[in-house]
Image: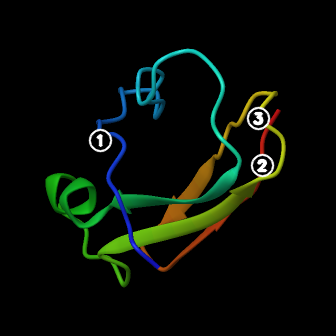
Amino acid sequence: MRLEELAHGATTTTGRCRTLLPPGKLPVGTYRLTFEVAAYFAAHGTTSFYPKVSVHFEVTEAVGHYHVPLLLSPWGYSTYRGS
């Protein structure tokens, strides 16, 4: 599988990255979000078991809103499709 970077960004102090992609439809396909979390934890004086978190997801309809929250601690994480 060939990967192509579509965008990169940083979260705000509230943990959101609203400008990652421009408004509009996201084409049907498989995507990967990679969260670089080591720098975040290092900035807070905390070590982390996961230096990066990659979330793969599939867009099956080119309409709709895609919100992918990452709930994070130094020793684990979870994610889901938000509303």
Q: Amino acid at mark 1?
A: His
Label 1: which residue?
A: 8
Residue 24 % position (x, y): 61, 18
Mark before the other along the chain sequence, 3 or 1: 1
Q: Is residue 58 above or below residue 82?
A: below
Picture mark count: 3
Q: Is residue 63 above or below residue 48?
A: above
Label 2: which residue?
A: 81
**From mark 3 to mark 2, how far is it between C-alphas?**
15 Å
Q: Nearer the viewer, residue 54 or 2?
A: 2
Dot 3: what SS?
Answer: loop
Q: Nearer the viewer, residue 63 or 9?
A: 63
Residue 44 % position (x, y): 22, 53
Quadrant where the image shows the C terminus? top right
Mark before the other along the chain sequence, 3 or 2: 3
**From the viewer's perspective, is 80 left or right of 13?**
right
**From the viewer's perspective, is 31 left or right of 81?**
left
Label 3: which residue?
A: 62
Say which residue appears at 60% left-offset and 67% top-offset.
Answer: 56
Q: Amino acid at mark 3?
A: Ala
Say which residue appears at 25% left-offset and 54% top-offset.
Answer: 40
**From the viewer's perspective, is 17 left or right of 62?**
left
Q: Amino acid at mark 2?
A: Arg
| Badge 1 density bin: few <14, some 14–19, many ≥20, Cα 10 Å | few
Q: Is residue 64 above or below residue 46?
A: above
| Badge 3 density bin: few <14, some 14–19, many ≥20, Cα 10 Å | few
Q: Nearer the viewer, residue 34 or 38?
A: 34
Q: Please, which colouring scheme is shown? A: rainbow
Mark before the other along the chain sequence, 1 or 2: 1
Dot 1: what SS?
Answer: loop
